Amino acid sequence: MSDIAVQANNIGKMYHIGNVITKSATLRDKIADGFVAPFRRAHKLLKGEATGAAELDQTIWALKDISFDIKHGEIVGIIGVNGAGKSTLLKILSRITEPTEGFAEIRGRVSSLLEVGTGFHKELTGRENVYLNGAILGMRKSEIDRKFDEIVAFSEVQKFIDTPIKHYSSGMTVRLAFAVAAHLEPEILIIDEVLAVGDIRFQKKCINKMQDVGKAGRTVIFVSHNMSAITRLCERAILLDSGMIVDDGPANNVVTHYLNSGEGTSALREWPDVNRAPGDHVTKLRSVRVRDINNEISDTIDIRHPVKMEMEYDVFEDGHILLPHFRLHDHEGIQLFTAIDVDPKWRERIRPPGRYVSSAWIPGNLLNDGLTFVGAAMLTLQTRTPHFVEPEVVAFHVADTDDTNSARGDWVGGMGGVMRPMLEWDTEYIPFVPEAASSPTSVTRPA
Amino acid sequence: MISENQIENYPGTNRTDPLVEDYPITLLKPSKGWTSLKLGELWEYRELLYFLIWRDVKVQYKQTILGAMWAILQPFMTMIVFSLFFGKLAKVPSDGIPYPIFSYTALVPWTFFSTRLTQASNSLVSGSNLIKKIYFPRLAMPTASVLAGLVDFVLAFVVLLGMMVFYGIYPTWNVLWLPFLLLLAIATGLGASLWLSAMNVQFRDIRYTVPFITQFWMFATPIAYPSSLIENPILRAMYAINPMVGVVDGFRWALLGTDTAPGVLIIVSTLSATVLLVTGAFYFRRMEKTFADVV
């Protein structure tokens, strides 16, 4: 069929993972081991038990039995927890690595963007890097020549275009890199989690650009942890778990499925392993939770009820006045608000080392119905140093109600807007004076 | 024949996207064993190849004080050391040519070969971020790395011309063979680089081995001494299995007019360079599929 852009048939990818290396106890053992190891390795190689550095003892299927069709012009989001196989799938589709079994057929030129600024060289100027990066991403020189001014304008680094990028800030580098990528015109574009960089304003610009790409009839395959970006950009999503397709369908449904399954509920994210927890030597985020009015962890909240957001974190280093805060986004990526810890007990107070749970209540009848994403972040007040910034770690559904004691009152239709506050209404009634009632033109307006 | 009208009505095509039927089809499937070289694809990516060469050239001497002077200094200083120790002290014969230009003529192609071998054998590892993030024919990386050395070669060659004027040595018509000899040096460098760079992906031992390889290879090549030291014609032909023997002897013959007509040497060297290059390319292609997973 000619309208199929990507067809995957039972794709599987197996990786060899080496054995856990037994640690040598002493330096003497280590040195001895260092001398013996090459012979052991050579022996294994000869016996065909190993290939190169990886031993064949242990294997893992990063992907198994992956089949799907993607039509031309479709924008498909691929979601799943870390290690679900998303990146491996993109690597196979963009030809970086081969599948171990199965096959895929791709109709059209593919550009893949698995990283922003692949091949950027810090010693080269912005201008030179645009050409180099463009060529690496598969653009012809004539094409780059033609789009050069547009790319530079998009990147907003005009003034520094002839400066080596080692003098750029990281934000500038990212902007330049994305500007190049945004001007690719392949039939099929494969993107991995690149929207997670840059400031919010620039991210918006990129999302808009990507929407234009989609409207231009190009096929986009897009991996992200940013669920609001997925629901906003993609009409369809594929959910992967442990290398298999768990769900494939309209983006909204699949995202909901993912958030409801995933690791535990979507209303709870935990980092049991302190080494993998987000944060730095000062403080690390250990978990984020959403609780309902009964203090139960819940991902569905009645629109009339308050919601409690909790972040649990460890402080390791003494001497910091810390500022925990939450950021809330709706499913379209619009930021609802930022909630900064204003607990009077800890205002302008150093938090000594230990475990903390900071929580904040969102009043009922404030958010509109739908998916709300909560991000947790922490910075030091004086220096403004961020310690962790975890956008959209948990999410909850604000569930609408037909009950008339909500902000919708007696109305049963749709309610637009990002918020649905229940406001205090007051009505003043001024009855008409009897003679004015007969001549409507002379009605006196209420003051 | 299909008319314009019919094409427009053909299912799957429409005005906004008239090329749907023309989209190239790529089949992604596991490859087994030896595969074709896909040189056509390398040609399609020639602009990338050009930019990779251009990057290597541009970046090479960034943040150095002497910059491109290094391209000249490396063979030139070696020539001075050789002239002192081998020429003056050890009195190594030099086919009647002044020893400095005798050794420098050999050092120009040799320096090209050895520095490129060192760079290119590490090219896949140092470019691992590219390999893991984007598709292109991997052959482009060692190829670009080798070809980027041509700029240095030209600079060192200009100095060689200056030295010829200084010593009053003028080339014969044999100089027309020089492009071929250079090609032979490129083929040798590329062939060895393909083997070593592909192996280096899996075995980082290669990185530590390359300095030894280039050192042994230099002594196995008539740089500090003339190939005429080997008189037995059969031994000489065997000696030329090292393709750099043909290159270096050819350079001396073409530029300095040494009378050791290197015909046999060059033929043997050309054959062995071809074998090295072709086997290297096939080995590289065979290992290529594992690069992104292993590097």
Image (cartoon, coloured by chain):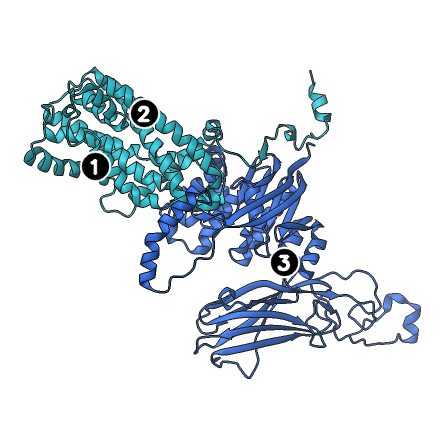
Residue denoted by label 2: B272
Subunit under mark 1 = B
Q: Secondary structure at mark 1?
A: helix
Residue A419 position, x and y percent, is 70, 66
Between the C-alphas of marks 2 and 3, the distance is: 63 Å
Q: Do marks 2 and 3 share a subunit? A: no
Q: Amino acid at mark 1?
A: Ile
Subunit under mark 2 = B
Q: Secondary structure at mark 2?
A: helix
Residue denoted by label 1: B72
The part of the image, by quadrant, that contains residue A11 is top right
Figure label count: 3
Subunit under mark 3 = A
Residue A120 visible (yes or no): no
Between the C-alphas of marks 1 and 2, the distance is: 29 Å
Chain A: give its colour: blue
Give the crowd class for mark 3: few <14, some 14-19, many >=20 residues within 10 Å. many
